[in-house]
Image (tube, grey):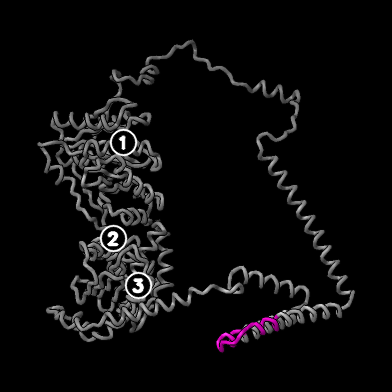
Amino acid sequence: MLDSFTILTKGGIVLWSKEFAKIKGSPINSLIKKVLLEERSAETSFQIDSYSLKWTFSNEFDLIFVVVYQKIFTLLYIEELLTTVKKRFIKMYKDLLLKLKESSDFIIVDKFQEFNFEVILEEVENRSKLQQSSNSTPKKYEDTDKGKLVKDQKNERAIKEGRVEKVKRKEQEKKEKAERRKQNKANNINDSDDDDDDDDDSDDDSNDSDSEENSDGATKNQQTDVAKIENSDEEDEEIIKNRNKLIAAKAKKSPGGYKKKVKDTPDKQTSSSSTGKKARTWEDGKLSKKELEALNRSENNNSTEIVREKIQKFNIEMDVSSSDDDDEEEAKPVSGFMKYFNVLTGNRVIDKQDLEPILADFKLHLTKKNVAPDVADKIVQSIGTGLEGKKLATFQGVTSVVKQQMEDTITRILTPKRNIDILREVQAVKGKRPYSIVFSGVNGVGKSTNLAKVCYWLTANGYKCMLAACDTFRSGAIEQLKTHADRLNVHLFERGYSKDAASVAQDAIAFAKDTGYDVVLIDTTGRMQNNEPLMKALSKLVNQNNVDLVLFVGEALVGNDGVDQLTKFDKSLSLLANTTQTHIRTIDGIILTKFDTIDDKVGAAISMVYSTGHPILFLGTGQNYTDLKRMNIKSVVKSLLH
């Protein structure tokens, strides 16, 4: 049933491997590249092609145990197999693994070939078969949820009627009968006589119960009958009240319900007529020259002055605290999420039971920092797998190990898979064709403003930029972009409203090529992620023009919704992609706006990058053109830890 089982170090050295079938491709290499290196080890399994992979770690010896099998099979013993193999392998080669961890100058892999995996596999498979056969027997009615509920109701009724001892006695008799039946089945005795006896016993029980109830006296029966009548009367009154409330609520909500008309009194009529709308007087339409000039918004008006921005280079890197500040923080008492690890002290090995309550508190800490709950859960599990099995000496060791593990995890998440250097890419195509950048996102996140910021930054670095107004849907979008173009003294290419955005972008790129522009910045319509027509239009614009860079502009204020927006925008780009294309176009990078308004709640950055793997290229930190920064991973990690 298995295809292969591999034991390797976290450094990538295979210590032991066994193949049961020929494997196509390299599923373990894909696991390392797409899961382990991207800090997604909290996921329970990984599927690629026709294979499914599961794994476990031994952090004490930096080992990874990986099993590969066909994903069409459902193997229930995989987790037990991984755990058993890990225990046996470590127990068998503990001394050798310690030497390997301390000094990795040379490794003799042949010493691990004596490991007898087939025996362990056979033991685990046999235990799994026995467990499945034992679980295949149906449950008794008393063990089901419904049976337990009925039993609880009977006990409550017995307590009210004062028959607790009688019920206990019956339950004890039933248990004794069940034990007798089990003994008879074990001894292969015919149960027919016992069944007859059971029926007789049940009749006797019913007769005994009837006689006991008769012996209680007529007065007790009368009291119970009166109590039942009173309870039924109270229930009827409560039902009637609830029914009347429901009818009244429906009458209020129904639009065609009966409403009592109230005639207007003379006072009300006079007040309503006196407060009517009055016509505005325009003073015969006569206005002064100053008022006419103030109202003139035409292009020929010479009185309007355009304020040009002074283009100059600026520091685009985020401000990071100095090492002195870090030293002062280390001298301070442990605070932030590190306080959750105060319980882990002494010379010991961290196990799963130690980590469970701590990681639960840390998950809550991440959600308060605006990390999406499902992303926070995966990050916490990944940190737990990295800490489980670590051997610690002192409390300071706990703090440093945990902090280092957290920093490594977040750093691996935020480290981009593709290194995007816009200036280098623009320089590579300069003189051949214009470099095109598309800005996409939902409504109101600041696409046009951050497009202008990027234009300012590129212009300051010596490149000739042009803006393309492809937002032909929103009123005032072209005028807004024209204001930015005038201030930055760059050309604006536009074709007006209600035009095909993909065609406008195509004409803009062709015009930029003919006139010698280096960069074309394409503004698009803000659209919600579930608006299918507009999402198809975006896919058409990107795929038809084969743009160089597609940026998603999102807010730093959102949590789960930002992840949903980004993932759906990512998928939409492949809607109209050419089927012959080998590379399906997706979002290339993220611009996170309003980053200056979130204080230390930087969780949206973690959520977006973890969900899609796309890097954050820029952060919007204000309203000015120079308020554009590159994200510093160290600064984000610091905000999450405190």
In the picture, measured across the screen, residue 459 lies left or right of residue 212, that is left
> Real-space Cα distance between discs 1 and 3?
49 Å
> Real-space Cα distance between discs 2 and 3?
17 Å
In the picture, measured across the screen, residue 283 lies left or right of residue 177, that is left
Q: Position of residue 410 (x, y in %)?
A: 30, 62
- Number of the label disc, if any, that sits on residue 50: 2
> Real-space Cα distance between discs 1 and 2?
40 Å
Q: Which residues are magenta?
A: 181-198
Label 3 sits on residue: 78
Q: Secondary structure at mark 1?
A: loop
Q: Neighbour class for label 1 at 10 Å: few (<14), some, many (≥20)?
A: many
Where is residue 491, by image quadrant?
A: top left
Tell me which label, 1 or 3, sits earlier in the chain: 3
Residue 159, compared with residue 25, is above or below; it is below
Label 1 sits on residue: 524
Q: Position of residue 431 (x, y in %)?
A: 10, 36
Q: Position of residue 136 (x, y in %)?
A: 48, 73
- Asked if the magenta segment contains residue 316, the reply would be no
Q: Amino acid at mark 3?
A: Ile
Q: Residue furthest left?
A: 431
Q: Secondary structure at mark 2?
A: loop
Q: Secondary structure at mark 3?
A: helix
Could you tell me which residue is drawn at 29 percent across and 18 percent down?
A: 300
Could you tell me which residue is drawn at 36 percent across and 36 percent down?
A: 534
Residue 280, compared with residue 234, is above or below; it is above
Q: Amino acid at mark 2?
A: Ser
Q: Which residue is at the front of the view, 124 or 569?
A: 124
Where is residue 509, by image quadrant?
A: top left
Q: Indicate which label's residue lies in the foreground, 2 or 3.
A: 2
Q: Indicate which label's residue lies in the foreground, 1 or 3.
A: 3
Tell me which label, 1 or 2, sits earlier in the chain: 2
